Amino acid sequence: MSHLDDLPSTPGKYKTDKALPYGILHHHRYLRLSKPTLWASLFLALFFFYLLLSPPLTPSRRNLNDSSSLSAKYGGSNWEKQVRKSAHPRSRGRLTVLDLGAAEFVGTHVSIAFQRRGDGVLGLDNFSRYYDPKLKRARQGLLDRSGVFVVEGDINDAVLLKKLYDIVLFRHMMHLAAQAGVRYAMQNPGSYVNRNIAGFVNLLEVSKGANPQPAVVWASSSSVYDRTDHPASLYAATKKAGEVIAHTYNHIYGLSLTGLRFFTVYGPWGRPDMAYFFFTKDILRGKTITVFESPDKGIVARDFTYIDDIVKVCLGPLDTAEKSTGSGGKKRGPAMFRIYNLGNTSPVPVNKLVKILEKLLKMKAKKKVMPLPRYGVVEFTHANITLAQSEIGYKPAVDLETGLKKFVKWYLGFYSGSKKKSSW
Ligand SMILES: O=C(O)[C@H]1O[C@H](OP(=O)(O)OP(=O)(O)OC[C@H]2O[C@@H](n3ccc(=O)[nH]c3=O)[C@H](O)[C@@H]2O)[C@H](O)[C@@H](O)[C@H]1O
């Protein structure tokens, strides 16, 4: 499909040289046949040379104020129709939500939950290759069957985001399109800066300029919790930066913003880069898993939070979000700014996680115990959810064993190629 902006804005218009002073024309008349042709040829040669050498234009080169028209995978009247249809609420008073990162783990669950209660939801995802894209495509299939259309695009693509706002007046944006994972930040730090900082600023810029401005809810992380000025990993640092940047957009432009600090969210359709997921895979294959322990041989534990508890609470922040107060980039009054911790409030040692998996899989894990690596893994997480309980009615209800049981059931069905219908 071709990009909608590919057409020149005013085809056929050109400037004449009538306005040039006579002296200049006269002085250069004799050059018309030689020098201009020479310069034009030289310019063209340089231009083609530049095209040959320059890397292909990727969405990340199209952020912030870049409004150049470039080819992309979106556009056309059929595409616009799909965008409108997906974003259209099914009943009066329902929301119109743009869900960024819709083919991601939390994004898929949340999009379907919004869609089921009648909200209009349009997804956007760049289908990055951070982990097996087949899983993301399978999630896209689920979304498709639920009536949620996913636009293939990147949060750094300001042209695309503006185009979407032109087509639909989104009142709400759910941003779950971050670069996740604590370990991968050591291998590809640029990806964290590109998505969690540049991409976030890009979508805030577009949102601030929209009229009306949407209320934005975005995923922060437990990694920011408690260690605000001393993040333990680059991932945590970019998430912390996100919270600080969000505050400035709230303060300067009146954007209504709500940050959700997720605590190690797990469940069916989860992320293969997370320990519960690849432990399951490795135990089943008889491969050794590495279990971390703290330097003083103390326990390493996580406040593992089941996806259904997160999905329920993700609806609340959008329902309770006050409108942004600005429009077209101008603030008209103070706007809402909130940050919530969303954990299960009962940390479980990683050793216990392994024991539960062994029981559910009916297989003994081959374990290697290693000291915590120095790339920024913290020993313990435990959420204080008082604010989320009182303001958005957060009530986590699923314990780790119950949640893992559902995950393992899904995992076995999904990877054995079972035709059995999932619980959706
Ligand atoms: O709450 C968050 O904000 C983050 O949660 C998640 O990070 P973590 O809590 O670190 O989860 P995860 O990697 O599954 O490790 C779980 C446990 O297994 C231990 N662990 C891990 C790997 C290993 O090989 N061995 C091991 O013992 C490890 O020490 C840890 O104790 C998300 O990945 C992250 O994107 C972000 O969303």
Image (cartoon, rainbow, N blue to C red):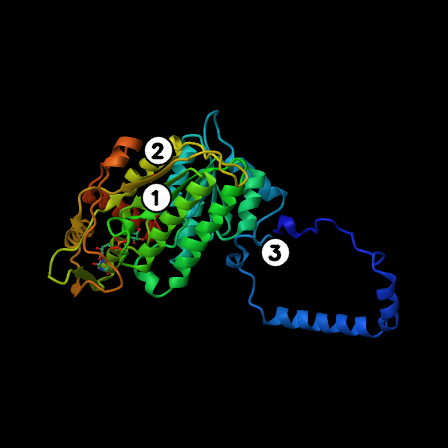
Q: Eyeballing the image, is 174 above or below 130?
A: above
Dots 3, 2 in contact, CB < 8 A: no
Q: Which residue is mark 1?
A: 420
Q: Is residue 128 visible?
A: no
Q: Residue at x 34, y 43 (%)?
A: 420
**Residue 316 bears which disc, if any?**
2
Give x and y (percent) for residue 402: 21, 42
Secondary element type, mark 1: loop
Neighbours of disc 3 within 10 Å: few (<14), some (14-19), many (20+): some
Nearer the N terminus, badge 2 or badge 1?
A: 2
Which sits earlier in the primary sequence, circle 3 or circle 2?
Answer: 3
Say which amino acid is labelled 2: Gly
Instruction: List x then y, in percent, for residue 221.
Output: 31, 49
Helix, strand or loop at mark 3 = loop
- Image quadrant, ligand 1: bottom left
Query: Is residue 327 found left or right of 290 in the rendered image?
Result: right
Direction top: furthest residue: 92
Residue 157 lies, with reference to residue 310, above or below; the image says below
Kindly identify the amino acid type of the residue bearing the numbered disc 1. Lys
Q: Earlier in the sequence, mark 1 or mark 3?
A: 3
| Residue indicated by mark 3 | 70
In the displayed structure, would residue 246 be above or below residue 274?
above
